[in-house]
Amino acid sequence: MKFVALLIPFAILLSMVKGQLVPAMFIFGDSIVDVGNNNDLVTLVKANFPPYGRDFAHHEPTGRFCNGKLAIDIIAEGLGFTDHQPAYMSDKANGEMLLIGVNFASAASGYYNATAILYNTFSLSQQLENYKDYKNKLTAITGKSNTSSVISNGIHLISSGSSDFLQNYYINPLLFTSYTPNMFSDILIESYDNFIQNLYELGARRIGVTTLPPLGCLPAAITAFGHGSNQCVARLNNNAISFNNKLNHRSQRLKRRFSKLKLVVLDIYSALYTIITKPDENGFAEVRRACCGTGLLETSILCNQHSIGTCSNASQYVFWDSFHPTEAANKILATNLSNSGSSLIQP
């Protein structure tokens, strides 16, 4: 037994003792997975004020775009983590907390770096730089060998692309007059390809990437692009489906190129679309409107403690604000994503 223990890196042994299925998680992307990295930025895109977080621990806003837990929080708990991966820009991201991984995600960022620049948030390129900085800090704590083991055995999750379309392309004449949705998605896919290659070169071997959700079914998208209808906007959903097909195809190509890479595409589109189109079967009463305010357009600073009409029971709603799911919906999404990404935790 002692001999076996010597063969297992300390960081991996520690995670086994703690009951974690993997040593660490690293999260990149946008507001779907941001846990507070934007809190201290000079940006309109943040969620560190009520009523955000009202159903979270201690009923406190943390920067999560939700009334409670994100899908990523629930996934981490399912993997045996007793603490959620801290926002890298927070005070919690130091010392032993670095051993379980960190969250680099920033709301209003995307595969297209100009999206983050537009909103003064952390682009994926900057998130990658922060990841390199994190590796140096972890090496100082555990040594180079243990750090390599944590990185290669840890799960890296990416959720990006929605902001590129909804908060940039569709509302930016400089983009939608220059590129078709198909051309723009090609640009995003090239950025995704580069990001995966960079992560691989830095030691990542287990990577999960979410597809785009059904963009045309988000309350804000229906309000802005639905021309008065209360139905999902087919054009936006078709753009998402086209992007997702390209994402799957490119991911297969990357796996063929890098034989040691475990890369899984996590289908959030189907999971969320099923909830939206079959709310009763999933325990929801309201799909078109979000819980916060009127539920038609509010998000970030427009969703605040003075918003008139905010619901009292968010568990009956699929959406918390006009872009983001409630904790109740996130629980269902987390189960689906965990099942589809189960191969990432296998040896």
Image (cartoon, grey):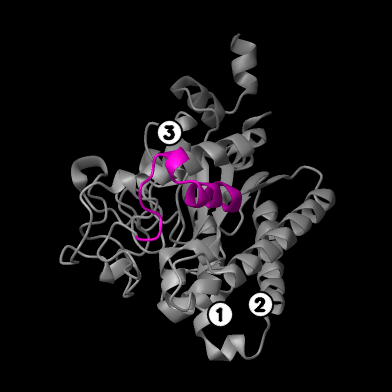
The answer to whether residue 296 shows anywhere in this view is yes
The answer to whether residue 68 shows anywhere in this view is no
Q: CA distance from mark 2 to mark 3?
A: 37 Å
Quadrant containing the N terminus is: top right
Say which element carries label 2: helix
Q: Which residues are magenta?
A: 269-289
Residue linked to disc 2: 181
Q: Residue 200: where, in percent of width, then height?
A: 69, 52
Residue linked to disc 3: 77
Q: Residue 132: where, in percent of width, then height?
A: 55, 57
Q: CA distance from mark 1 to mark 3?
A: 35 Å
Q: Amino acid at mark 2?
A: Pro
Query: 62 or 231: nearer the eye?
Result: 231
Q: Could you tell me if the residues under marks 1 and 2 are in contact, i.e. CB atoms within 8 Å?
A: yes
Say which element carries label 3: helix
Q: Residue 44: where, in percent of width, then height?
A: 32, 74
Please state which of the two labelled residues, at mark 1 or mark 3, is closer to the viewer.
Answer: 1
Residue at 61%, 19% (x, y): give it.
6
The residue most toward the right is 256
Residue at 55%, 39% (x, y): give it.
336
Residue 169: assigned label: 1
Magenta span contains residue 255:
no
Q: CA distance from mark 1 to mark 2?
A: 8 Å
- The picture quadrant where one finds residue 239 is bottom right
In this picture, is 37 found above or below 227? above
Q: Amino acid at mark 1?
A: Tyr
76 with respect to 181 (left or right):
left
Residue 266: assigned label: none
Residue at 46%, 58% (x, y): give it.
105
